Amino acid sequence: MNPEFFIEALAKKNFELSSKQKEQFSIYYRELIETNKKVNLTRITAEEDVYQKHFYDSVTPVLEFPDLFQGNKSLCDVGAGAGFPSLPIKILCPDLRITIIDSLGKRLKFLDSLIQKLGLTHVTLVHSRAEDAGQNPELREKFDLVTARAVAKMSVLGEYCLPLVKIDGYFIALKGPKADMELNDAKKAIKLLGGKTQKVVELTLPNSTDERTLILVKKLNETPKKYPRQAGTPNRKPL
């Protein structure tokens, strides 16, 4: 998926990129590759692969659930790494207020520089473990949307993300193919943490055989105060 095909694929989904947005994705690619020479951000470096497996993949929630991204919404991205999926989503939806949580300072330094070069506003970077962020009163149950991509299995991911979601907000997990078993194992955890699975969308990235799954979870009730548990526990002892 070269940049031109990426632009066409979004247009087919009724997202016409402006000249500014096209340039932002171009800058993003250049900065990612340049920084990746010094800091390990991604194994995917070919332009066509980055546009498909990072940029397009990241914006699939907007393409599949466009109504959720309308208006003055807040989005928290847990474990964003090189900014995926939140920064491609931000480029597509400039009015979103973004908070990115990551535990690695080197990645946040890259993101800080990238955000400035992309000319993005209303993006906040938080240096924290997800478990600590979920117990932080300034972050807990404060977001309309919470995303996570390639971070952990669903039972663990729910404990990282659902404490950050407002009641009536949504947690969107970007997963690989055939996430049914993983989701089934997470049913108990999702309910315990105040969520309910609303929709599961299976899709294939354009012009490829790369399968993806989007899991949409609505926050119905407050998350019990003891969750998330202390750092490392959710991964060692999933709910």
Image: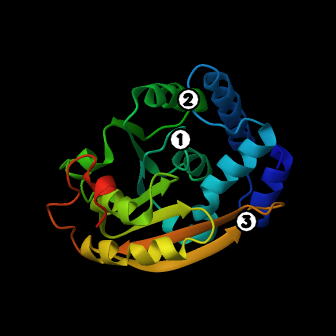
Q: Can see residue 238?
A: yes
Residue 25 spot, x, y in % from top left = 69, 39
What's the distance in space between the residues labelled 1 and 2, CA to CA?
Answer: 9 Å
Check disc 2 and report its element: helix, strand or loop: helix
Callout count: 3
Q: Is residue 81 above or below residue 191?
A: above
- Dot 1, how many residues are within 10 Å of its Cα: few (below 14), some (14-19), or many (20+)? many
Which tag is nearer the camera, tag 3 or tag 2? 2
Going 78% across and 38% down the picture, which residue do you hit? Answer: 47
Q: Position of residue 223 (x, y in %)?
A: 22, 67
* Left or right of 72 on screen, residue 212: right
Q: Is residue 239 above or below residue 117?
A: below
Tell which residue pokes out farthest to the left in this image: 225
Q: State the SS at label 3.
A: loop
Residue, disc 3:
14
Q: Residue 213 location, x and y as percent?
A: 60, 68
The three-letter amino acid code for the residue at tag 1 is Gly
Which residue carries the number 1 mark? 83
Residue depth check, mark 1 versus mark 3: number of the one nearer the observer = 1
Q: Residue at x 48, y 44 (%)?
A: 80
Task: Look at 85% across and 52% down and name the residue there.
Answer: 5
The disc, 1 or 3, on the residue closer to the chain's N-terminal end is 3
Q: Nearer the viewer, mark 1 or mark 2?
A: 1
Q: Quadrant of the C terminus?
A: bottom left
What is the three-letter code of the residue carrying label 2?
Leu
For the residues bearing labels 1 and 3, Cβ distance under 8 angstroms: no
Label number found at residue 114? 2
**Label located before the other in sequence (1 or 2):** 1
